[in-house]
């Protein structure tokens, strides 16, 4: 087996371990067992668990950027693109077992590394949104505003509409989410 293949094998095993057991409970022994390699093999590629975790997060972030770039259609209005990108990213996030486990671990046990990992991923999404808001302002699609504040509000609103609202209300359809998102951010509530 080639060196590159072993490294990838270790990364896949570590992703599986972090997804099943969380950050805190994952050990290098578990990763070695899942990868079917000796523990020493892992250390030829990664100094410690933290470095391995960071590499996995980097790969997830790269994949998220690919998804966002794929969803942007420059000939479409800002809000259409925004909805498509957020929808694709949240779908990716909800289907990716690592996110689910990190969210549970951060919420239930307060594991700093799990929270930090989620924060890194969120900051990439927010930076991306901020750039899109800046471009929409330059093109006159939306009013001049603070892109950082607007990006955080957009992201939080989308999470509320897609995930948190279902705790107190029947889950919204994608079309309803799009309508409320547009109502709050594009039209406003005033008559």
Image (tube, helix red, strand yellow):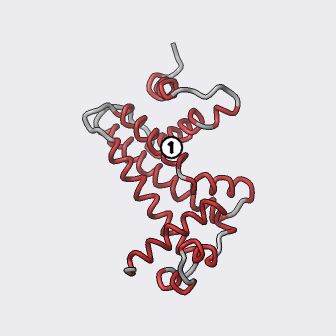
In the image as oriented, which residue stretches furthest toward the top?
191
Q: Is residue 108 left or right of residue 99?
A: right
Above or below — where is 189 with respect to 88?
above
In the image as oriented, which residue stretches furthest toward the left?
75
Total labels drawn: 1
Q: Position of residue 66 (x, y in %)?
A: 36, 52
The local secondary structure at tag 1 comes to helix
Q: Position of residue 18 (x, y in %)?
A: 60, 64
Task: Say which quadrant the N terminus sits in.
Answer: bottom left
Above or below — where is 62 with respect to 50?
above
The crowding category of the residue bearing disc 1, from other C-alpha atoms within 10 Å (few below 14, some 14 to 19, many at least 20), is some
Q: Residue at x 32, y 31 (%)?
A: 77
Q: Position of residue 2 (x, y in %)?
A: 37, 80
Q: Residue at x 42, y 45 (%)?
A: 129
Above or below — where is 2 with respect to 60?
below
Q: Give residue 34's quadrant in the image.
A: bottom right
Residue marked by disc 1? 90
Q: Position of residue 131 (x, y in %)?
A: 37, 47
145 or 117, nearer to the observer:
117
Above or below — where is 185 with respect to 67?
above
Q: Is residue 6 left or right of residue 72?
A: right
Q: Residue at x 63, y 65 (%)?
A: 113
Q: Residue at x 55, y 46 (%)?
A: 94
């Amino acid at each position: 087996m080639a060196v590159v293949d072993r490294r990838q094998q270790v990364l896949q095993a570590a992703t599986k371990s972090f997804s099943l057991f969380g950050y805190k409970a994952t050990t290098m022994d578990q990763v070695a067992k899942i990868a079917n390699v000796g523990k020493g093999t892992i250390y030829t590629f990664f100094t410690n668990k933290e470095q391995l975790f960071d590499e996995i997060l980097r790969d997830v972030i790269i994949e998220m950027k690919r998804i966002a770039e794929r969803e942007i259609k420059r000939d479409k209005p800002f809000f259409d693109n925004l909805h498509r990108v957020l929808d694709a990213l949240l779908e990716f996030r909800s289907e990716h077992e690592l996110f689910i486990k990190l969210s549970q671990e951060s919420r239930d046990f307060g594991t700093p590394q799990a929270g930090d990992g989620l924060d890194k991923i969120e900051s990439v999404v927010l930076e991306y949104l901020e750039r899109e808001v800046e471009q929409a302002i330059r093109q006159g699609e939306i009013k001049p505003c603070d892109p950082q504040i607007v990006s955080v509000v957009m992201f939080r609103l989308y999470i509320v509409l897609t995930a948190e609202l279902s705790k107190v209300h029947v889950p919204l359809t994608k079309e309803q989410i799009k309508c409320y998102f547009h109502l709050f951010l594009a039209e406003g509530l005033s008559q």
